[in-house]
Image: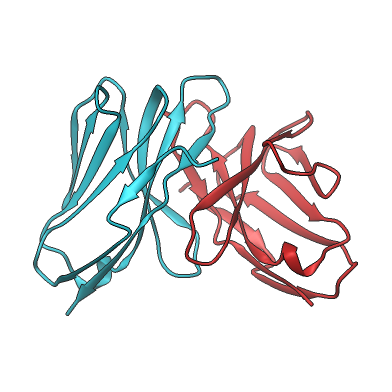
Chain colours: A cyan, B red
Amino acid sequence: SQQGEEDPQALSIQEGENATMNCSYKTSINNLQWYRQNSGRGLVHLILIRSNEREKHSGRLRVTLDTSKKSSSLLITASRAADTASYFCATAIMDSSYKLIFGSGTRLLVRP
Amino acid sequence: GAVVSQHPSRVICKSGTSVKIECRSLDFQATTMFWYRQFPKQSLMLMATSNEGSKATYEQGVEKDKFLINHASLTLSTLTVTSAHPEDSSFYICSARLTGGPGEQFFGPGTRLTVL
């Protein structure tokens, strides 16, 4: 079963604006990861944040993690039309399986 | 680096036939690979964890006799959909975990299966 939910389900913004996506999960985690998927393609790993980290940056991406609220957010700054894709959070639960449980995803449309 | 390939990218088959999908890690060794299924506009559902040299671990509700997984080497895992039916039509994606890494997975491009 899916670990958590993401909101919004869909987001449409103008190029240059920032996009924020939120992810909530249910169980204790080892780390949380964000992935991007273009339509009909595989997933691309964006960023991994460990359970003892609160914030992480990578280029135009900023991820936060609040383990007390079991939530994470992904911020894409200065968005571009090429950022149009579906974004998924995935949680690695605290066992030895290394399994990832994916959230429901946010479909982002960046209008040129 | 860390490239995962899948073959075939698309397959159309008749109901009742079996289909094999290959997942290869091209430039790294992966003791653990994962198989996911994705329906249109939905998230990925983990089907099973494929462990090199041992039996796969299936998620609840996934029929192991229906979806046969073989992880014969450190760079290859195969998923065979046996006696496929139209309800098995889906997008199947594999991923590989970099052994010793922090936990990120590298995904293949996916296989679109259509069962007529």
Give the quadrant of residue A44.
bottom left
How many numbered discs, if any? 0
Give percent across and percent down for residue A46. 33, 48
In the drawing, does residue B14 fall left or right of residue A17? right
Q: Judge whether B92 appears above or below B52 on screen.
A: below
Give percent across and percent down for residue A49. 29, 32
Which residue is pictured at 16% across the width and 64% down the height? Answer: A79
- In front: B94, or B116? B116
Give percent across and percent down for residue B53. 78, 30
Give the quadrant of residue B77.
top right
Which residue is pictured at 40% across the width and 23% down the height? Answer: A30
For the N terminus of chain A, which image quadrant?
Answer: top right
- In front: B89, or B102? B89
Q: Judge whether A19 appears above or below B103 on screen.
A: below
In the drawing, does residue B51 fall left or right of residue A42? right
Give percent across and percent down for residue A88. 38, 50
Q: Judge whether B1 appears above or below B82 on screen.
A: above
Which residue is pictured at 11% across the width and 59% down the height? Answer: A18
Which residue is pictured at 23% across the width and 32% down the height? Answer: A65
For the C terminus of chain A, which image quadrant?
Answer: bottom left
In the drawing, does residue A55 fall left or right of residue B93? left
- In front: B42, or B10? B42
In the drawing, does residue A22 fall left or right of residue B63? left
